Image (cartoon, helix red, strand yellow):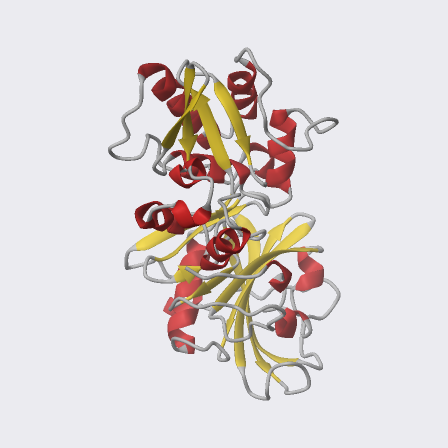
Amino acid sequence: MLLPRPRLIAALLAPLLAGCGGGEAELATPPSGPSSTVMRPSGETQGCMAPTAGYRLRFPADWSVNEPTSPAPCRFFHPVPFDLPEQSEATGIAIAVQMESGLFAERVPSGDTRAATLVERREARVAGKRAARVETVSTGRALLPRGVRVLSYYVDFDSRTLVATTSEAAAAGTFDANVGVLDDMMANLTAIDSSRSCSAAGLPSGAAPGARLPTPVGATHSAIIRAAIACDYATLADIAAAGSRPFTYSFGQQGAPAPAEFWRQAEQRGEPALRMLVEILRLPYATRQVEDSTHFLWPSAFGFGRWRDVPVEDREALRGVYSEAELMQFEEFGAYVGRRVGIEDTGEWLFYVSGD
């Protein structure tokens, strides 16, 4: 998996956006022939969703994508795993997709610009919306060297425009192959209602294989997962409020929004709070005796006071949820301080919180 850094947003699209002209574009009627159609995928694919941006798409199963825990999921796609250093221009990434502010007519190039020469512009339909498939060649007067071909899609999302691009500057794969993948991705792009979606939408239901829990704990565990996948903030809040003690969701929760709004705001900021909730609950758990009750703790790494005491298998279980850099942070801090969940043996949901 790709391990991006938060400050990379919009870096890859810089050369393309530098070449965009203003004004409303009159889109040409697409020419006849097979090259005017958007190809359907022929191989195995995997899905990815950017809930706050408002789109879902599919891409090759053997490609890498930026971490779902990043502030901008479903942003970068590449044929091989890689890491982006901070403040990188990211021009070597095969495909980038981003929701941009601004009207469609203002984003689509209407002709040559200082940065790029327009080769072809085709009218298209993507996710049932007006779109344009645009090919340009760089002039060498901006970030890209002279003569680099760039293929981009522009999709009309009312006051926003989705821009997806690939170029010959990609560090892996061939331009023609990457264009084919981009065509496939756009053929399968779906617009979603960001106000009714969340980062957990589309995740499979059910507990982790082999999980055995006491009936009250298992019932709460399953109910939380179902509500999170359904993006049902109200039900999550009801489960949290059902206990006899205050539910902990933020160390600074005095004066903070109620749990439902707290998680909703996190999702709107691009933080996958509900996806992480589901993924954490599917990890191995630990137990801790607290007075006359037993607390079930996810992940199991949280059951150890010191990071150095966490068994190797419990650390390995975290790799599907956290990046290598985040695991290093736990090691440097000396303890697991990521998101964790606690459920009492009575079935009471005690906390879902992160930090130290």
Identify the image quadrant of the C terminus.
top right
- Left or right for 121, reference 324: right
| Residue 60 in picture, x, y percent from top left | 35, 59
Question: Considering depth in this image, is 315 or 188 the residue closer to the camera?
Answer: 315
The picture places residue 110, in percent across and down from the top left corner, at 67, 70
Quick one: 129 or 299, which is closer to the camera? 299
- Which residue occupies 56% across, 16% down? 241
**Residue 141: percent from the left, percent from the top?**
68, 86
Looking at the figure, which quarter contains the N terminus? bottom left
**Is residue 33 visible to the viewer in this orientation of the structure?**
no
Q: How many marks?
A: 0
Is 348 located above or below residue 185 in the figure? above
Residue at 57% x, 14% y: name it: 245
**Residue 350 location, x and y as percent?**
51, 22
- 325 relative to 213 in the view: left or right: right
Residue located at (59% from left, 29% from top): 249
